[in-house]
Image (cartoon, helix red, strand yellow):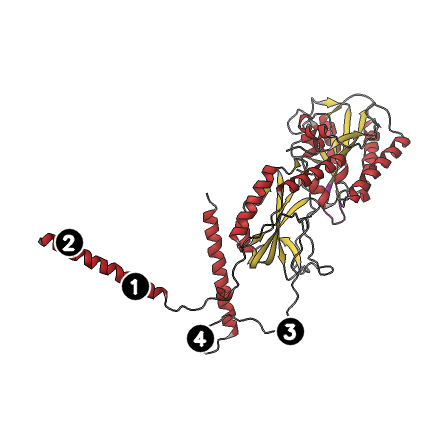
């Protein structure tokens, strides 16, 4: 009986201790606390999913505050007035700490196709052909050996500049007609998803969360922020504050159209970013987006033309070493895979862009024995959509071909070994103009930034 009584008493005492501890916790939770800067923020919106595809983004335009409007101040419990500078400093520190904490949490939680017609259809001068690719050619591009040679993009070479002792401050982009200045993302070739932020976010907070937003399959993904100071979209940059974001995936490139799997990968990454930033995303419809990608890919295939002319030796074959020497002396640059030389030309902004390429049969200038390798034909290829019409690229190709022919004891001919005549040049120029007009009508002039993105991998 003594043991039972002791156990009963011990149980009663333990129960009383638990009840007392709970009451203490409740009273502690009800104690008043100091107000925080975020206490007066409006409640978060639930993510809004729109079934309608919006290719363009209507950015929120922020009018400057009237001069007489008093700057908003955070509440404080202090009875005496605080210095305005001290209040502002405290607010900035609190916001920065909150951003860093959220970025750390998200980083820990996140730890867990047909192509553009064989990357450009070779069109020889004798045929003077700029015909469109049909669907069969469009899907069978990988079987042709020239695809890998012409599809690979060479990084543009920018001229070197000496560092100036002091750089003048660059002016901010100026908005036209009150609209945000455009950046890289273009509704002509991109599927754009707006992300509406509940409050401004810094680039330092956003950048660590964009690790999955680089590519979706074979398609490039871009993310830009709306910077209120310049009223312009720009790639997200550390140290800048953004009021809205837009994320875009390219609808098509020379690897083919955006497919359902790539679209799903893109949407999942966007949703993860929106959740991490407490933002609402306007997601497009998959069926319509994929259909838009196929239509754009079909258009690109019909314009993906490469024009070729040949330099044929009148006598003995040339060695690969001799061809390499001539190309290098003429300022052509060997590609990284060693299969071709490229002539670059500066555009209106001074950036060097590929103009045409020189190939010597199947010679690889990095792997082959250049003294033993020989041939009688040099091919000059012009990637028509990638060269601006204003630079008269085909004329440049022909002039360089004639120069080679004169110096190397050769002649400029077509595929049937017939010398190119003035009438054949007139026919070629006419068909090139038709192709240029087609690209222009679509809003993608040859050699423009959007066209270079579309006709690339």
Query: Could you say whether the residue bearing mark 3 is in a helix, strand or loop?
Result: loop
| Contact? badges 1 and 2 (CB < 8 Å) | no
Residue under pointer 2: 7
Q: Is residue 214 magenta?
A: no
Kindly give the residue lying farthest to the left in the view shown: 1
Residue 365 location (% of width, % of height): 68, 29
Q: Earlier in the sequence, mark 4 or mark 2?
A: 2
Rounded to the nearest whole Å, what is the CA distance between mark 4 and mark 3? 28 Å
Residue 229 location (% of width, % of height): 64, 62
Q: Earlier in the sequence, mark 4 or mark 3?
A: 3
Numbered mark located on residue 67 in the image = 3
Residue under pointer 1: 23
Q: In this picture, which residue range is highlighted in magenta?
A: 347-353
Q: Is residue 352 magenta?
A: yes
Please say if 189 is above or below 363: below
Numbered mark located on residue 273 in the image = none
Res. 217 in view = no
Residue placed at 30% from the left, 61% from the top? 22
Residues packed near mark 2 inside 10 Å, few (<14), some (14 to 19) or many (20 plus): few
For marks 3 and 1, give the one nearer the viewer.
1
Kindly give the residue lying farthest to the bottom in the view shown: 80
Rounded to the nearest whole Å, what is the CA distance between mark 1 and mark 4? 30 Å
Rounded to the nearest whole Å, what is the CA distance between mark 3 and mark 1? 53 Å
Residue 207 location (% of width, % of height): 55, 51
Residue under pointer 4: 78
Rounded to the nearest whole Å, what is the CA distance between mark 4 and mark 2? 54 Å
Q: Quadrant of the C terminus?
A: top right
For marks 4 and 2, give the one nearer the viewer.
2
Residue 188 location (% of width, % of height): 71, 46
Q: Earlier in the sequence, mark 2 or mark 3?
A: 2
| Contact? badges 4 and 3 (CB < 8 Å) | no
């Amino acid at each position: 009986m003594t043991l039972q009584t002791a156990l009963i008493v011990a149980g009663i005492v333990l129960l009383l201790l638990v009840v007392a501890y709970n009451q203490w916790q409740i009273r502690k939770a009800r104690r008043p606390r100091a107000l925080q800067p975020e206490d007066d923020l409006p409640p978060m919106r639930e993510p809004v999913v729109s079934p309608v595809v919006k290719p363009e983004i209507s950015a929120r335009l922020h009018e400057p505050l009237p001069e007489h409007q008093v700057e908003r101040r955070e509440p404080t419990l202090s009875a005496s007035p605080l210095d305005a500078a001290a209040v502002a400093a405290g607010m900035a520190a609190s916001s920065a700490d909150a951003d860093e904490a959220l970025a750390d949490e998200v980083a820990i939680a996140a730890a867990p196709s047909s192509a553009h017609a064989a990357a450009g259809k070779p069109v020889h001068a004798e045929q003077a052909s700029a015909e469109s690719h049909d669907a069969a050619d469009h899907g069978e591009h990988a079987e042709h050996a020239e695809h890998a040679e012409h599809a690979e993009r060479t990084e543009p070479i920018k001229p070197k500049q000496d560092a100036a002792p002091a750089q003048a401050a660059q002016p901010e982009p100026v908005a036209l007609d009150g609209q945000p200045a455009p950046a890289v993302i273009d509704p002509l070739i991109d599927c754009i998803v707006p992300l509406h932020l509940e409050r401004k976010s810094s680039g330092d907070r956003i950048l660590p969360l964009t690790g999955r937003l680089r590519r979706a399959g074979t398609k490039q993904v871009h993310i830009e922020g709306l910077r209120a100071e310049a009223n312009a979209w720009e790639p997200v940059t550390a140290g800048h504050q953004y009021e809205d974001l837009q994320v875009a995936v390219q609808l098509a490139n020379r690897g083919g159209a955006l497919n359902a799997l790539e679209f799903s990968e893109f949407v999942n990454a966007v949703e993860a970013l929106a959740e991490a930033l407490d933002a609402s995303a306007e997601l497009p419809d998959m069926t319509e987006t994929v259909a838009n990608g196929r239509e754009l890919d079909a258009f690109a295939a019909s314009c993906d033309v490469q024009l070729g002319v040949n330099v044929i030796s009148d006598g003995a074959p040339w060695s690969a070493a001799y061809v390499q020497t001539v190309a290098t002396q003429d300022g052509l640059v060997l590609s990284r895979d060693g299969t071709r030389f490229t002539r670059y030309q500066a555009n209106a902004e001074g950036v060097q862009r590929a103009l045409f390429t020189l190939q010597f049969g199947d010679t690889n200038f990095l792997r082959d024995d250049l003294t033993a390798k020989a041939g009688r034909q040099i091919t000059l290829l012009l990637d028509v959509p990638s060269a601006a019409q204003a630079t008269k690229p085909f004329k440049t190709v022909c002039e360089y071909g004639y120069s080679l022919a004169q110096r190397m004891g050769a002649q400029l001919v077509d595929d049937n070994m017939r010398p190119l005549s003035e009438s054949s040049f007139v026919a070629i120029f006419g068909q090139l103009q038709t192709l240029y007009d087609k690209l222009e009508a679509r809003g993608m002039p040859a050699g423009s930034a959007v066209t270079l993105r579309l006709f690339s991998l």
